[in-house]
Image (spheres, rainbow, N blue to C red):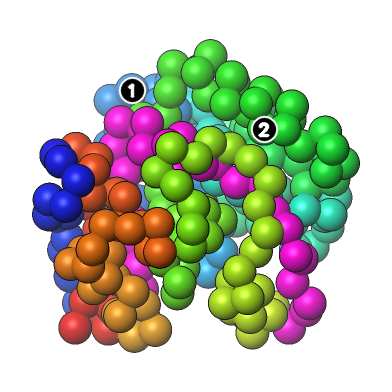
Amino acid sequence: MSIGSKIRSRVFADRMQAELALAGEIAALVRAKPDAVLGLATGRTPVGVYRELVRMHGEERLDFSQVVTFNLDEFEGLAPDHRLSFRRFMQDHLFEGVNLAPENTHLLSGDVASDEAPAHCAEFEERILAAGGIDLQVLGIGLNGHIGFNEPGSGVDSRTRRVALHPVTRASFEESVGAEAPTHALTMGVATILEARAIRVLALGAKKRAIVRRMLEGDVSSDVPATFLRGHGDVRVLLDAEAGA
C-alpha cells in the first residue's frame, strides 16, 4: 500500500462492539500463533479490549504463556509502580489478569535518566528485533494525530526516542486523570510502528471524529503523524458510531 492510499475502516454500533472485535482478532492471533508478539497501547481507549482478553483467559482458557509484548510508550519521570505509569496501567488492566510471563513483557522505563535515554531506546529496538518483530500493533490516536507519543512534527523515519509532549497531549492527560502531566516521554518511533506486520487503530467517541477523518482523508504529513499509517499494507481502523459519524 503506497503513501496516500486508503486505510480500511469499520464503524461499529458502539464502543463495546469495537472493543470486542479487536479483542477477538488478538485472541485469534494468539490461538494461531501461541508465541505471538503484540504491540500494546495504554490510556482509556484499549481498556475494554484488555478486559475482554482477561475474560477470555479466565473463561475460555486463552493462553498467553508464550506471548511477548512491547508497549508503545511511557511517561518520563515515573517509577514503574507509580499510579500513573504505563507499567502500572498494564499490570492493573492486563498483565495481572492473564498468564503472561513477566520476562516477556517489555516497556520503556520512565525513570531512566535523560542522558541514558538514547541507549535505553536503542536497546528497546534491539529487543523488538530479537523477538522477531511485532505481529500486531494496537494503537489509539491522539486528538492532535499522534500515534504513540509521536507528536506533530515526528518524521516517518523516527525511531524509539525521548520526546517532548505536545500541549494538547498534556491537556488531555490532565483532563483524564486530574493530575499535572509530565513534560516528556519515551516512545516507539513512527518507523518502529510501521515495521509491525499488522496495525489496528481503535478510535472511540465524538472527540476523535475530526482527527480520524484527517487520518483517513487528509494530506499525508508530519503535521498529523497518524497519516503515515497509510503507507502500511495491513492497517485497519475500528470506530464506534460517534467517532465514525
Q: Where's residue 95, x and y in %?
A: 62, 44
Which circle marks residue 188 in the picture? none
Above or below: residue 179 compared with residue 131: below
Above or below: residue 216 compared with residue 78: below
Q: Nearer the viewer, mark 2 or mark 1?
A: 2
Quadrant showing the N terminus:
top left
Q: Check disc 1 and report the residue beneath it.
A: 33
Q: Residues within 10 Å of mark 1 (few under 14, many from 20)?
A: few
Residue at (48%, 62%) from the top-left corner? 152
Residue at (35%, 68%) from the top-left corner? 203
**In the image, 53: left or right of 174?**
left
Q: Where's residue 40, x and y in %?
A: 50, 45
Residue at (77%, 53%) from the top-left corner? 76
Q: Where's residue 67, x and y in %?
A: 49, 27
Q: Check disc 2 and report the residue beneath it.
A: 121
Tell me which label, 2 or 1, sits earlier in the chain.
Answer: 1
Residue type beneath disc 2: Cys
**In the image, 133: left or right of 244?**
right
Q: Secondary structure at mark 2?
A: helix
Asked whether residue 170 appears in the rendered view, the answer is yes
Residue at (31%, 50%) from the top-left corner? 228
Q: Where's residue 138, x and y in %?
A: 40, 48
